[in-house]
Structure formats: C-alpha cells, structure tokens
C-alpha cells in the first residue's frame, strides 16, 4: 500500500465535501480502526473511505428553521 492511498479524517471530509464532524462520527459509530497511526494522526485506506462514504448517506441532515 502506498502512502498516497491513506488519508486523515479531515482529508476524507474534504474529498467527500462533508463537515469533518460527520466523518469522525461515522468513524466512531462503525468503530473503524485506522490502518496506520502516527502519533495522534489516524490514516484510513480507500476501502475504509468507501465504508465512511456509505455510512454518511444514512445520517439525516439536521435542518433548522
């Protein structure tokens, strides 16, 4: 696996055009473990990014009036 295949939660949020808190929520909800951990930085693979993407579709957006 190349280093370019691994992304942080913030990078995943940027790629999916979602707020970072929604991505971290999905990561915690599905208990996704990072492929690599460098200090406090967690890196996720393309397979996990697909799982995060699928998990985001199930979260309804909160709308305020």
Image (cartoon, rainbow, N blue to C red):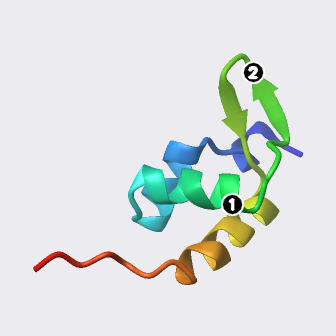
Depth check, mark 2 against mark 1: the one in front is 1
Q: Which image quadrant is residue 30 in?
A: bottom right
Task: Provide the residue designation for mark 2.
Answer: 38
Sort mark 2 into few (<14), some (14-19) or many (20+) by Cα contacts within 10 Å.
few
Q: Residue at x 69, y 60 (%)?
A: 29
- The C terminus lies in quadrant: bottom left
Question: Where's residue 56, x and y in %?
Answer: 56, 74
Task: Provide the residue designation for mark 1.
Answer: 29
Question: Where's residue 8, x and y in %?
Answer: 61, 41
Q: Residue at x 39, y 57 (%)?
A: 19
If you read the primary sequence from the N terminus, does the residue marked by circle 2 or circle 1 appear first? 1
SS under mark 1 = helix
Sort mark 1 into few (<14), some (14-19) or many (20+) by Cα contacts within 10 Å.
few
Side (left or right) of 1 relative to 43: right
> Eyeballing the image, is 1 above or below 46?
above
> Eyeballing the image, is 20 above or below 50?
above
């Amino acid at each position: 696996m190349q280093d370019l295949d691994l992304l942080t939660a913030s990078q995943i949020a940027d790629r999916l055009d979602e707020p970072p808190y929604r991505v971290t929520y999905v990561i915690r909800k599905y208990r996704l473990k990072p492929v690599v951990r460098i200090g406090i930085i967690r890196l996720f693979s393309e397979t996990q990014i697909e799982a995060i993407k699928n998990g985001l579709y199930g979260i309804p957006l909160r709308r305020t009036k």
